[in-house]
Image (spheres, rainbow, N blue to C red):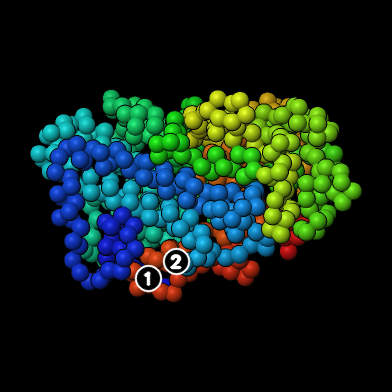
Amino acid sequence: MRKSFRYLAVGSLLLFGAAACADLEIANQNAPDAARSLASAGDVESLIAGSFNTWFNGVNAYGGPGMFMSNAAFQHNAPWSNSGMEKYGRLPRISMDNNVAASSYNNFVRPWYRSYRAISAVANGLAALEDPEIADELGAADVLRITAFGKFNLGLSHATLAMFYDRGFAVDETTDLNEEQEILDYNTLMERALAYFDEAISLSSGASFTLPLGWMQITLSGPELARVAHSYKARFRAQVARTESERAAVNWSAVVADVDAGITEDLVPFYDDYNGWSLDVLGYGSYYGWSQNAYFMYGMADQSGDVDRWHDLGLTEKSYQFADGEPVLIVTPDLRFPQGTTVEEQRAAKGTKFEITKSSHLGNTWKKPERGVWRWSWYKTWKGREYWGVDGYDLEMNQKEIDHTEMRLLKAEALFRSGDKGGAALIINETRVEAGLNATDAGGTNTSCVPHLPNGPCGNLWEMLKWEKRMETQFVGLAGNPWYFDGRGWGDLWKDTPLQFPVPCQELQVLQQLPCETFGGPGGEMGAPLSTYAFNGEG
């Protein structure tokens, strides 16, 4: 594999993701156009102000990878082929189909092109700020605000590339696009992203500016933007890990420092589904007919023995009921789940997070048996009713971008890994006890036996930490997929699930860097090993 590509920007950045073939030896013709389009202070501000929405739509929209990643991590399951859900959620796993003509190709390449589109906007905008006339027209205060926000979005976009792809390029306003660009591995790319966040933090921490509502769908002061940047750093530093060994080697003291300097309450923007701010992974991942919570992970709450019996069945026999017609129910003291011992009781007493699917919706739920009845379940996340405004629920577009509980549980993981298991237990108990479960301690006491692992025992302290993280952060995070990004670093993904995405083949064709690579699938490079839980049928 060559270590550098020539004139990457001609193919990916300055053409905003255009895929037309290009002569890689020609001079950059885009710069004059950029200069003409950034002739005023308002142009510069608008370009950088819109970069967050460009990034947001790259990772959260229906056309992105979030829905198939959620299926692959068992965060939710659906039998439909939309957005690659069935394809990349099937068992056994398949490799990434890095072929321009392949179905779902656009889903996994979308974060690449949208992130570089955001990077290009910021790079051109920050370069334009060096024009004294534009800087004077804006004034020092606005230049500071725009620059800080630009650096923040350089951090977000480069971190996103490092989280998804095996390699990528770092580009900013100082990059000479006529020079050969070095390709960076994902860890090095993440280091660059963290450095951009640090620049944003330095500029914002003591600043008096306020970001307008439309920039991030929430108003933030300079110090608040700095806190948000710290929290993103904590998340990305931990979740970039592809394997258990990489996750263990994370700089956990730095994670703690960023958590402590980060948000003090949930970051809750207004995601206007009708005006370019659609959180589709949450929307479709919890909407009836589009979502079921398969028993592989959620079943660890069960105390009745039903899920143990379900695990003992072969993949073609696993379903929402047993051969005798009895339903597979999760009976648990965990109040996040519906309470009761029958379908009727649980339907009448939904949990704080999950519910039994309404009888009127079941016809849209148990479909396509040929795609795997193991996907079928009585359970779903009820958040979709709120997000879509159905079944008498008010439309609620205020949704979490960063959950403060997520940050607290990241700190708990850092404490656990450093040997402070008592400190980790105290944080775990904050949500555990609220959910009706008995408190744990440094020794991992689990008298509630939640989670109850597929291979038999009650979960230890480490498993209780992971359980709380899964239950409390569902659909919150990059591409709405904490279960995928945490799962790969915890070693919990189903065997052969791709651990990362390849550079888009379309890009490699333009850059003359064939053949195109792929990951995952049986015997493939960078596929998940046998999971922690060694599920029956995983192989």
Quarter that holds the C terminus = bottom right
Q: Position of residue 43 (x, y in %)?
A: 20, 40
Please give the name of the residue rendered at 22% of the width and 44% of the height, measured from the top-left corner: 126
**Numbered circle sitting on residue 182:** none
Residue 66 seen in the current view: yes
Looking at the image, tell me whether mark 1 or mark 2 is earlier in sequence order: 2
Quarter that holds the N terminus = bottom left
In front: 156, or 384?
Answer: 384
Residue position for label 1: 509
Residue position for label 2: 100
Q: Is residue 33 left or right of residue 221?
A: left
Q: Position of residue 68 (x, y in %)?
A: 57, 52
What is the distance, in whole Å, between disc 1 and disc 2 at their CAs? Answer: 10 Å
Q: Position of residue 318 (x, y in %)?
A: 78, 53
Task: Name which quarter of the figure residue 522 lies in.
Answer: bottom right
Q: Secondary structure at mark 2?
A: loop
Mark 2 crowd level (few <14, some 14–19, many ≥20, 10 Å Cα): some
Task: Name which quarter of the figure residue 185 lies in.
Answer: bottom left
Q: Position of residue 304 (x, y in %)?
A: 85, 39
Q: Is residue 319 left or right of residue 390?
A: right
Q: Amino acid at mark 1?
A: Gln
Please give the name of the residue rendered at 23% of the width and 60% of the height, measured from the top-left corner: 177
Say whether marks 1 and 2 touch (CB < 8 Å): yes
Mark 1 crowd level (few <14, some 14–19, many ≥20, 10 Å Cα): some
Q: Amino acid at mark 2?
A: Val
Please give the name of the residue rendered at 50% of the width and 65% of the height, measured from the top-left corner: 102
